[in-house]
Image (cartoon, rainbow, N blue to C red):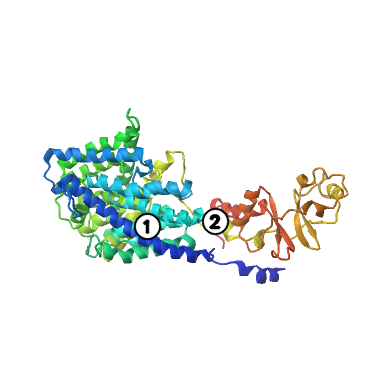
Amino acid sequence: MSSLHSTTYDEHKRDYAVDRRLLLMAALALVVGALGTLAADVLLKLIHFFTNLFFYQTLSLADRSPALNTLGTWVIGIPVLGGLIVGLMARYGSDKIRGHGIPEAIEVILFGKSRMSGKVALLKPLSSGIVIGSGGPFGAEGPIIMTGGALGSLLAQYLHLTASERKTLLVAGACAGMTAIFGTPVAAVLLAVELLLFELRPRSLLPVAIACAVAGFARPLLLEAGPLFPLQTAPVTSIAWASCIVAGLLSGVLAAAMTLALYKTEDAFAKLNVHWMWWPAIGGLVVGLGGYIEPRALGVGYDVIGDLLNHRLALGVVVALLTVKAIMWVIALGSGTSGGVLAPLLMIGAGLGVALAPWLPGGSPQLWALVCMAAVLGSVLGAPLTAIVFAFGLTHDTEALLPLLLTAVVAYGFTALTMKRSIMTEKIARRGLHIYREYGVDPLERQHVADLMSRDVIQIDGATSTAEACQLYFAAAQMHRRYPVVVAQRLIGMLDRDSLRGHEHSDATCAELFTTQTPLWALPGETARAVAGRMTEHRVSSLPVIADAQSRQLIGIVALSDLLRPQQAVMREETVRERMRG
């Protein structure tokens, strides 16, 4: 039997669960990648348009910084006006445009079957363009994640794809948009793995990677090519490892403090005795005041990030600028307005590195700005690999990879140990929806029916009368709840007490009870996960196992207790401590 098992059933086993629909999803990913790139270009143009309109009163798509405005004290009212417009759009358009985009995308993926509306695809970039263009201290990545995701979801809905396939195209669109904004395709793929997909499978990884690659190739056609912040730091010395640990711990502390401050601010807004529609305007007032004090704190601030990384600003200027930026960002985002978190976190993290640079030996000042930038981002998002590769993609600085790795994972470890949730999941948890972000290979996916089924099966001949079956199999000494019924070795169904009700004293055969029913079964090459799902769907505790669908030859039976065995083995591995064996 072991030889039969190895030759017959092993052919069903493979490293990955794939089918031909992967080719369809790959083709659709090409389209979604192009759509995400176009959406990113539109979003950036909207930001430029509204920046020129609000701060310079001109109709232009030129890339101009709001910091160069000459409005004087009138600048305080510009973010208020932008917040008021977006509050009205959220109330009378779609409240899904509120927030920074990534938590909303996660919620739709996990709890909304990856369905996004056309309103989100239209209103999210428009609202974000207004908020950022009116001085909001945000980046474009959160809005483009929602916008690109909405485009992918809408395409999947139009083609009547499954919820799982909708998720894949949603994430593909989101990450393609991020690639187009920052020019970091590999980091965008890692963002999908660490934050959005909640799985690592070819069925989702390949389409997302294809969409990001398409966006990466298409980006120079619409946007500037090359790294956003080109940088080349000097090689580090051996003492740098200690500096990386210190920088990582302090980055983790800053990330935790900012996360707590954000949600304390959200709580404060929730206590206001005014409708949430007005909250963005109130937050805009703080943004306006901050912009009046520190004009360079307004808007996305890519130029400021570049200056911080290249160590062009004095320490006093950095402390003042970043303090104002952090306050503006926390209050504006806590007000529920529309904008992203990556660019502000990059700026604040780089500012921490500038402040620490005089005290950290082993590397250049530019290095510490870079590694703290990545460490703060990775620990706030709970995505260290994304942050490491993202920092490399933004700068193309190969010398910094090792310090980036150590600093980012130390910061991530600090927040993982001290924070229950990240900035990505706390908002969702407050709505009563818990997210568990750890995932691994499901033990039920690793085991097949052939590995778990019982081959010693008690079966009932279809010619047996129902009265006799009651006496032999369902009396006081009943061994199982259900028994397979066969006719000429061909499975015709599963017999239980409910099937026999009303036939306890009948001369009818058991086979006559299954004349109109199609039996449920399992195949030896199916995974335990697939069979467990079928049992749950049909509310049965066991399934007969047949050799193939044509012959229906009964070869075994698999019960829920059999499916629990892999999980029991995992629990032993997790909890039992063993001594070293000689």
Which one is in front in this view, the residue at disc 1 or the one at disc 2?
1
Position of the N terminus, as image quadrant, is bottom right
Considering only order in the chain, which callout, 2 or 1, is on the residue closer to the N terminus? Answer: 1
At 88% from the left edge and 49% from the top edge, which residue is drawn? 507
Residue under numbered circle 1: 175
At 39% from the left edge and 54% from the top edge, which residue is drawn? 151
Residue under numbered circle 2: 442
Whether 324 is drawn above or below 514: the answer is: above
On the question of residue 505 being in view, the answer is yes
Q: Is residue 521 left or right of residue 240?
A: right
Q: Residues within 10 Å of mark 2 (few under 14, many from 20)?
A: few
Instruction: Indicate the position of residue 225 as horizontal and vertical percent values.
Output: 25, 65
In the rendering, which numbered label is found on residue 293?
none
Helix, strand or loop status at disc 1: helix
Q: Amino acid at mark 2?
A: Asp
Instruction: Indicate the position of residue 5 as horizontal and vertical percent values.
Output: 68, 68
Foreground residue among 67 and 6: 67
At 44% from the left edge and 62% from the top edge, which residue is drawn? 28
Helix, strand or loop status at disc 2: loop
Position of the C terminus, as image quadrant, is bottom right
Q: Is residue 516 left or right of residue 110?
A: right
Q: CA distance from mark 1 to mark 2?
A: 26 Å
Q: Amino acid at mark 1?
A: Cys
Foreground residue among 446 and 11: 11
At 25% from the left edge and 48% from the top edge, which residue is drawn? 348
